Amino acid sequence: MGKKSRVKTQKSGSSSANAAVTPKEMMSIISELLQKCSSAAPSAGKEWEEYVQIRTLVERIRKKQKGISIVFEGNREEYLSELMSWARESGASSDGFTVADFGSEGYGLQATRDIKAEELFLWIPRKMLMTVESAQNSVLGPLYNQDRILQAMDNVTLALHLLCERGDPASFWLPYIHSLPQEYDTPLYYQQEDVQLLLGTQAMQDVLSQYKNTARQYAYFYKLVQTHPSASKLPLKDSFTFDDYRWAVSSVMTRQNQIPTKDGSQVTLALIPLWDMCNHTNGLITTGYNLEDDRCECVALQDYKENEQIYIFYGTRSNSEFVIHNGFFFQDNAHDRVKIKLGVSKSERLYAMKAEVLARAGIPASCIFSLNGNEPPISAQLLAFLRVFCMTEEELKDHLLGEHAINKIFTLGNSEFPVSWENEIKLWMFLETRAALLLKTYKTTTEEDISMLEKPDLSLHARLAIQLRLAEKQILEKASANGRAKRLHFQEKLEEGAALPCYEESDIALLENTDADGKLPIILRKLEEVVEEEEEEGREIPAEEQNHLLNGDKLEEVNVEKTRTHTDVESALSIIGESNSSKLETEASE
């Protein structure tokens, strides 16, 4: 995916704004930023205040660094022919497509001939990829080998690798780096008033964390580059601005993917030139890694006629993930969803029993689930959780000690086998009420958002924020309406005295639920993110590492061809992109 640059090119040193800033003064402000970003998480309701304070420090730094970033002359389009020539000379496929401007979608791949569905039309050899392995073998290698935190943060390694190569006029990857946007549309580039439009949304916490994490990373690595002996020869030594780091982070965030290492034994992060120009559409995974030929390969998602844009499927991501990590909103997102955090209170009298039933079903007592924009509105896992959450003591005993207790555990997530009519009524009433309460946290109505989006002078970033806010509300409205409809349906069943469906071992519904993602047994194919305390607090780093690491997302089991780039809190991986933000059609586990 490529957005056209909207940055006016300025030569390094074109401004004298930084002339009066001494290294000591800059280090003082950087240390203040690091301290602020490393302090304890703010109390509930104070997150925005903390964000404003961090942003104020960052803006002070940016002002003092104005004019010292490395930028390229000319516009991005002028470098695209250089990218194609470099790809061809390096062994990549180049027949059948070119890079073209698709207006609001930015740059993408355009077919120059008819391409059939499932035809292998694009391959990129390993030598063209920028990876953690290539970083280790570059000028960054000595610092990487000495710094434990850098070793734990592959996405940051890739970002710094990108910056070092950008500063090297003889870099092998310069044609690729020239082709990258000079700025992005991730929330890191939003004005403060645009970020404020997301107040009250489910995505807001992730946006604030992303900014805080990026600021903390920058402050830490700025000090490291300036003081570590192994950094003395880095191109970053004399020019490492916040804008540089924001650009590198966003380049990685919107493009990073996991590929197998050379020997195939592990996975490593990579930037994949040319292929990463493809834009997203709904569909299926069509990209993988060919270990035998040692190259990334992509087959056509569908038939393409000459001059049509060639799309790929980024994965089953929500619009929140697209906006935060990719910088766009996908209007027809078949996989849009809203996170909902649910848990059984430890102070509840029946907590131990509920936790045990949930544990036997492979579900944590506290978890983040999703409300889906499309059918089914809730997953089998959320249905199972809500059933247990609403169980009476007798129903819990029946699932722990009663006859066929194991079978009842297996069918908890199957909509064909209610625990009881009363249980169904309670769970759907809970969902209806919970969604309605979440809707009340928004500062605008759906109608107001629709009206705002009709304004022709709305900035792109404001539009993205409002589109995301509106999409969340529409999903919650649907969930509340669906909960009400289900509640009324099961009330009728109860009043009619309808017989409760009974499970029989021969019943095919045990293995094949009518819902698309409701396969059983529950141990659970698509369990949403587990909410652990460290997810909010982050791993505590020893004092000598100065507590500079961040919370992040969990690294999932990796399929060589279908991976999602997540980061592990316990390993001190910081949010640069989620999962989550890579494009190599990555959602195998979802």
Image (tube, grey):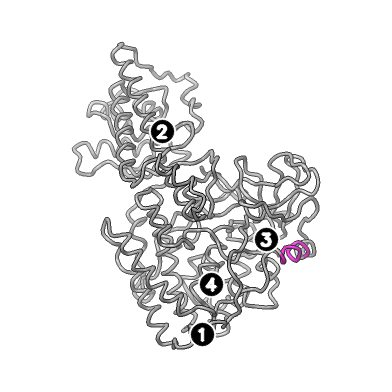
In the rendered structure, find residue 16 and report the number of the disc placed on it: 1
Q: Quadrant of residue 474?
A: top left
Q: Mark 4 points at which residue?
A: 244
> Which mark's residue is nearer the viewer, 4 or 1?
1
- From which residue to which does the magenta span run? 78-85
Relative placement, left or right, of 483 versus 80 is left
The kind of secondary structure element at disc 2 is helix
Q: Position of residue 84 (x, y in %)?
A: 76, 61
Q: Say whether marks 2 and 3 touch (CB < 8 Å).
A: no
Residue at the disc numbered 3: 273
Residue 371, horizontal then vertical, whole percent: 41, 38
**First in sequence: mark 2 or mark 4?**
4
Looking at the image, residue 39 lies above or below residue 567: below
- Label 4: state its secondary structure: helix
* Label 3: which secondary element: loop
Residue that appears at 45% across and 77% down: 63
Q: Does the magenta stretch include residue 84?
A: yes
Residue contact between numbered discs 4 and 1, judged by CB atoms under 8 Å: no
Q: In whole angstroms, how far apart are the C-alphas of marks 2 and 4?
A: 42 Å
Please name the residue that numbered disc 2 is placed on.
478
* Label 1 environment density (alpha carbons within 10 Å; few <14, some 14–19, many ≥20): few
Question: Mark 2 or mark 3, which is nearer to you?
Answer: 2
- Front label number (3 vs 1): 1
Mark 4 Cα shell of 10 Å, populated few (<14), some (14-19), many (≥20): many
The disc, 3 or 1, on the residue closer to the chain's N-terminal end is: 1
Task: Please tell me which of labels 1 and 2 falls first in the chain.
Answer: 1
Q: Tell me which amino acid carries mark 1.
A: Ser
**Is mark 1 in CB contact (under 8 Å) with mark 2?**
no
Real-space Cα distance between discs 1 and 2? Answer: 55 Å
Earlier along the polypeptide chain: callout 2 or callout 3?
3
